[in-house]
Image (cartoon, grey):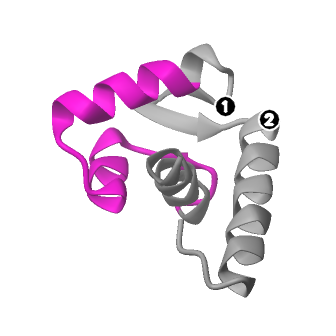
Amino acid sequence: MSILRDILHTIQEKGGKARPTHILYGANLSHDRLKKYLEYLEAEELIKKVEVKDQALYEITEKGLEFLSTCNKMNKFFNAFGVSV
């Protein structure tokens, strides 16, 4: 769950669109793991792949923003009780 949140957060911080390299570093993942997570997030429609000037970018969707917001709320809730997630 935290990896998904890190990926979505990285994309959001980059203005809603990010290159795979930025996501890779932001979520601290290997290339192989990143690829699997991006495929999963695309299948769940939390992100979508877009081409901008012949460059692949990943864009967070409205559903992805809602997911990220809910994750952040859950994280705050757990932290309030001293539980780290």
Residue 80 occupies which quadrant of the picture? Answer: bottom right
Q: Position of residue 41 (x, y in %)?
A: 55, 27
Task: Report if residue 15 is visible in the image.
Answer: yes
Earlier in the chain: of badge 2 and badge 1, it is 1
Q: Position of residue 22 (x, y in %)?
A: 33, 54
Residue 61 occupies which quadrant of the picture? Answer: top right
Secondary structure beneath dot 1 equals loop
Q: Is residue 40 magenta?
A: yes
Residue 42 vs 1, above or below: the answer is: above
Residue displayed at 75% across by 45% down = 67
Left or right: residue 20 versus residue 1 is: left
Residue farthest to the top? 43
Left or right: residue 21 versus residue 1 is: left
Residue displayed at 41% across by 30% down = 37
Q: Position of residue 8 (x, y in %)?
A: 56, 49
Q: Report the disc number at residue 63.
A: 2
Q: Report the disc number at residue 46.
A: 1
Residue displayed at 56% across by 59% down = 9
Q: Which residues are magenta?
A: 14-41
Secondary structure beneath dot 2 equals helix
Which amino acid, by three-letter code, is at mark 1? Leu
Task: Report if residue 54 is visible in the image.
Answer: no
Residue 41 vs 67, above or below: the answer is: above
Label 2 neighbourhood size at 10 Å, few (<14), some (14-19), many (20+)?
few
Q: Is residue 7 magenta?
A: no
Which amino acid, by three-letter code, is at mark 2? Lys
Residue 4 vs 57, above or below: the answer is: below
Label 1 neighbourhood size at 10 Å, few (<14), some (14-19), many (20+)?
many
* Whole-number angstrom distance, CA of label 2 to CA of label 1: 5 Å
